[in-house]
Amino acid sequence: MKKVFISFMFTTCSMFVYAQSGILDPSFNGNGIVTGNYTTGNNSADAMVLQPDGKIIVSGGTGVSSSIKIGVSRHNSDGSLDPTFGDNGITIFGSGWIKSFAKDLKLQQDGKIVMAGYRWNNSTGDFIMVRLNPNGSLDNTFGTNGIAIIDGGQTEVAESFDIDNNGDYIISGYVDDHFAMAKVKSNGSVDINFGNGGWVITPFADFASYSHDTIISSVDGRIILGGMIIDGYQNKYEYALAVYHPDGTLDTSFGNQGKLHFHVGIDNDFGMRILELKNGQILIGGHSWYATSPLRYEVAVARLNTNGSLDTTYGTNGIFKTRLVENGTSYLAGMTLQEDGKLVLTATANEGNDYNFGLARVTENGELDTTFGQEGKVFTHIPNSSYGESYNIGIQPDGKIVVSGDTKLPGLQIQYFIARYQDKTLAVQNVESAVAQLYPNPATDYINLDFAKSGKEYDVEIFNMVGQKVMKAKAAHKTAINVSSLEKGSYFVNLTAEGKTTTLRFMKK
């Protein structure tokens, strides 16, 4: 029988290259995933920010349903808690009411940490903003002891914010079911010269509308709010945006007098996140209904020109869609852009009793990037958990991808999680100089490793496509490894000797 060498498809070419973008990073807590809690109650990572030094800050609610505070933790680049932050890595505080929620988190240039969210007393709510010093203590130069309450006298829920060039903040969400935003000065006071006494509330006719994300344009300073409306005529959800001049007046050159709402699918569409491209175009992403029995949603991202028209060169007529699971729901949670312009998104994916989260990477022209994960997608199940729900995604300076959310582990309350993924393409390797030959590929029961050229003994570790180690062995000369117990799919084989590692790949049939 003819042997098929090396762990990739290869014909007469003596060179090969392969990608492992989307693999969980084992240098982060040993398996790529950290779980934690701020207190012994339920915990979530509703917001996340990545520091330039590789540290990761997450924030969210902590406590029980009747009493919720805000928890913040900072993790080192290896996943461990940073003891120089707060109380051994954690800061917890309330806002004066029984429930406080952090929904967005950003880092200022001076290293201070800013949060936006809302407080709730079971009947009404107020916008809140919080600023922490770099060590996790409340910044007493902001608001009252580090906390600013932005109360417009109605029921107010904040979802996001952004920082302008002057260091002031635009915080947005919804007030009595309408798009709403307020401007907060860098000291925590409301800027009464913005809008109407510091507030701008934007109705979409008689439709209920909910802003979920905020951008201050780096191109022209416009304020962009993105979210959804409920069409009062059809009782259907649609994507929605509103665009404003820096003073809070609507930019009438965008959409219909500054506002825009539209369907991306055939029924309910929920807009969740917006991003701005370097040329000023806008991405709005969310999820779109496409079938029932079982209920099914797919991820959908639209690219808009600066005037609000669809960029029909993107995806299909301006819209990219993907299904992380084919017979279930894919709910978009977060989007971020790589330096090369590719879009990376995370979504919760539910199919039957399997409730996990995934990622996808999208090219600049609106197609799945097949060099990422498996055909452009990555699925992650947190070991031993009953579910994993993602909320945020970001890119570290070294290109690694970080996702946060919450999960449920046996015997524990809900915990937050942080997962980190590698994003690199392995270098081109000459077949003739490879330390080992791997065959057959694809494999059924055994893989053979031939080290005849090196004469060394190697530690062999086999990883699946989500970075979990599934097998280890010692090998030298010619060694056969039984892989019959492995599930079908792609695997990486790390061969380590004298501190140097070579990675091969094979397919299990």
Image (cartoon, rainbow, N blue to C red):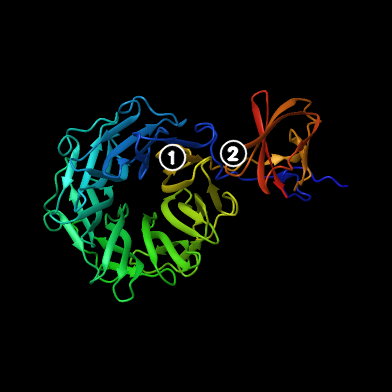
For the residue marked with disc 1, what is the amino acid? Phe
Which of the 4 image quadrants contains residue 265? bottom left
Q: Nearer the viewer, residue 394 or 99?
A: 99
In the displayed structure, 313 sits above or below 67; it is: below
- Secondary structure state at the residue bearing disc 1: strand
Q: Farthest residue toward the right?
A: 1
Horizontally, is 115 left or right of 317 in the view?
Answer: left
For the residue marked with disc 2, what is the amino acid? Gln
Q: Nearer the viewer, residue 121 or 70?
A: 121
Horizontally, is 346 left or right of 431 in the view?
Answer: left
Query: How far apart are labels 1 and 2 at the CA level?
Result: 16 Å
Which of the 4 image quadrants contains residue 277? bottom left
Residue labelled with disc 2: 468
Which badge, 1 or 2, is on the more N-terminal residue? 1
Residue 109 visible in the picture = yes
Q: Which mark is residue 478?
A: none
Q: Residue 148: image x %, image y %?
A: 18, 42
Residue 404 visible in the picture = no
Q: Farthest residue toward the bottom?
A: 233
Horizontally, is 116 left or right of 83 in the view?
Answer: left
In the displayed structure, 109 sits above or below 297; it is: above
Q: Which mark is residue 417?
A: 1
Q: Farthest residue toward the top?
A: 498
Q: Circle 1: is it few (<14), some (14-19), or many (20+) Cα within 10 Å?
A: many
